[in-house]
Image: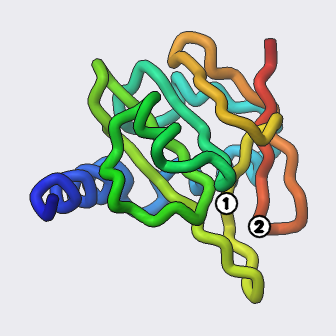
Amino acid sequence: MFCTGFLLLLLTTVSCGPGSDVDSIVKRTYNNGIDTIDLGETLPFDWDTMYWFPSNIPLEEINSIVNINKYWQDVGDRIVFVKDGKIVYYKEYFPYHETPLERICFNPNSVQAYHKNDALFSIEEKGDKLFILTKIH
């Protein structure tokens, strides 16, 4: 259990240095006057499928789709990027009611799966800390 969690933490840390995590990339794109983003082209790590899991999805259901460590907390939204069936990037958004998180969210706010070759989204800013991504078909 410790090794799996440590390796995943290390992988997440390595794949997203300062300013290269998904949230920073979306915010920087929007702040540069661009209201669309192709995640298949802009992320600094290789992936083939991205999953969005809202906070109301239990870990058991997530584990049936993507095998994550079932000991992680079950309280926040999460985004998971997978390459060849292995997690290459993972981020969990824990709710802080006193201080809103700077973060992204996907519309609709339900379980979503996207493929790298079809990952074009519009960006909508809500306040100064929330960016909503909507799939462009």
Residue that sits furthest to the left in the current view: 3
Residue appearing at x 52%, y 61% in the figure: 74
Q: Give the residue type at disc 2.
A: Lys
What is the x, y in percent for residue 91?
47, 54
Q: Residues within 10 Å of mark 1 (few under 14, many from 20)?
A: some
What is the x, y in percent for residue 47?
39, 26
Q: Are marks 1 and 2 in contact (CB under 8 Å)?
A: yes
Left or right: 127 in relation to 97: right
Left or right: 85 in relation to 128: left
Left or right: 32 in relation to 10: right
Q: Quadrant of the C terminus?
A: top right
What is the x, y in percent for residue 37?
69, 31
- Which residue lies under the disc numbered 2? 129
Q: Give the residue type at disc 1.
A: Arg
Q: Which mark is residue 58?
A: none
Query: Relative to 116, is 30 above or below?
Result: below
Give residue 36's quadrant in the image: top right
Residue appearing at x 38%, y 61% in the figure: 72
What is the x, y in percent for residue 113?
59, 24
Query: Relative to 68, is 108 above or below?
Result: above
Q: Give whichever of 94, 13 is nearer the camera.
A: 94
Element class at badge 1: strand
Which of the two discs, 1 and 2, labels the residue nearer the N terminus?
1
Query: Relative to 112, is 106 above or below?
Result: below
Question: How far apart are the alpha carbons under marks 1 and 2?
Answer: 6 Å
Element class at badge 2: loop
Residue appearing at x 86%, y 53% in the figure: 125
- Which residue lies under the disc numbered 1? 103
Q: In this rendering, does residue 90 appear at all? A: yes
Residue that sits furthest to the bottom in the current view: 98
Q: Quadrant of the N terminus?
A: bottom left
